[in-house]
Amino acid sequence: MHLVLALDGSPSSTQARDLVASRPWPDGTSVILVAAYDIPATWFSEGTVGAGDWLADAEAAMRREAEGSLASMATPLQGHGWVIERRAAQGRAASVILAVADEVNADLIVVGSRGHGQIASMLLGSVSAEVADQARQSVLVARGSAVSRLLVATDGSECATIIPDMLAEWASLRGLPAVALSVAPVDSPAFKLIVTLYTLGNEPAELQLDALQALHHRYATEMAGRLSEHGIPAEAEVRLGDAAHEIIAAASARQADLVVTGSRCLHGLDRWLLGSVVRNVLLHTQASVLITRRQRTPPGGRAGSCRGRSRGRPPRPRAARRRS
């Protein structure tokens, strides 16, 4: 397994590191620690005598600082049977993280979520948001240093049904209790009106709503069963209402510190983008969020995902490599 862990020395990235260190990843897992540093645009002013040499020295100093930070933060990850690698690169943080993840064909990217205090902890930093939105890999946004209970959201889609198998492959969440949640939008007045108008008397709206609720009950039950089969004891729950709101509320009520959800599977230029439900959950829950994306190997042998690639996506910088 290849895991990319973004570290910048902030408290939130320290939480991400500690969360990774707290879980039993498979022996031989490759943990690539990534730090980015950027040179301010104002340093590139024209006409400065000796600017090239000065910039080179400044860049070297920034690289040494980033590498030193990675070395000091790597200590809690040692001794677990993992291969630890450190990489520091010049560039925008999100671009560097995504580039390294693509280069090493990562299974998972772990980033911290910006936050200090209860209100700020619900906000998502721009780097975390960009990585979660654009990554081709699964992404874990950490809001805590440990995980004790999961809430797994399912809507019956392909990107949700892959969750149990992926968690089984990683084995890092095995043994933790979970709630498999599916949300049926049957108590929305607007939805009831649409169903009533659509049926036009052919079938009572109540039967349509009952059928929809039963469908989501099946989604939750099937997810709970598959999670339990893979060593994650789970129970099913169905809620009624807005999906994002109910996922957030259920995570709080169940004291889940990790919400697991699949990103939407689309085609074309929107393949890697998050759906509105996942984005709202990511922005507003106080729990850590794991967004699962299945990687596949397309023609040519390069690993991809259920989102694939976009032709219009800009190239990403390559990062310097350092193995500890």
Image (tube, rainbow, N blue to C red):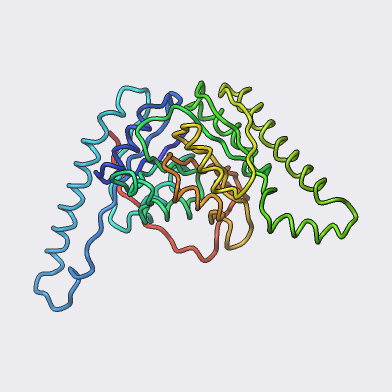
Q: Nearer the viewer, residue 155 or 105?
A: 155
Q: x%, y% of residue 93?
A: 33, 54
* Viewer-closest of 304 and 152: 152
Image quadrant occupied by the C terminus: top left
* Residue 57: image location, x then y, percent: 13, 58
Residue drawn at (11%, 75%), measured in percent from left and top? 48
Q: Quadrant of residue 180?
A: top right
Residue 3 at x, y percent in the picture? 42, 37
**Towards the viewer: 194 or 24:** 194
| Residue at (29% x, 44% y) in the render | 117
Q: Is residue 194 above or below residue 184?
A: below
Residue projecting furthest to the right = 202
Against 260, residue 134 (above or below) is below
Answer with left or right where residue 90 lies relative to residue 123.
left
User: In the rendered view, would you say 250 is above or below 241?
Assistant: above
Residue 262 spot, x, y in % from top left:
57, 44
Q: Residue at x 53, y 38 (%)?
A: 250
Pick the front one: 288 or 319: 288
Q: Is residue 170 above or below residue 90?
A: above
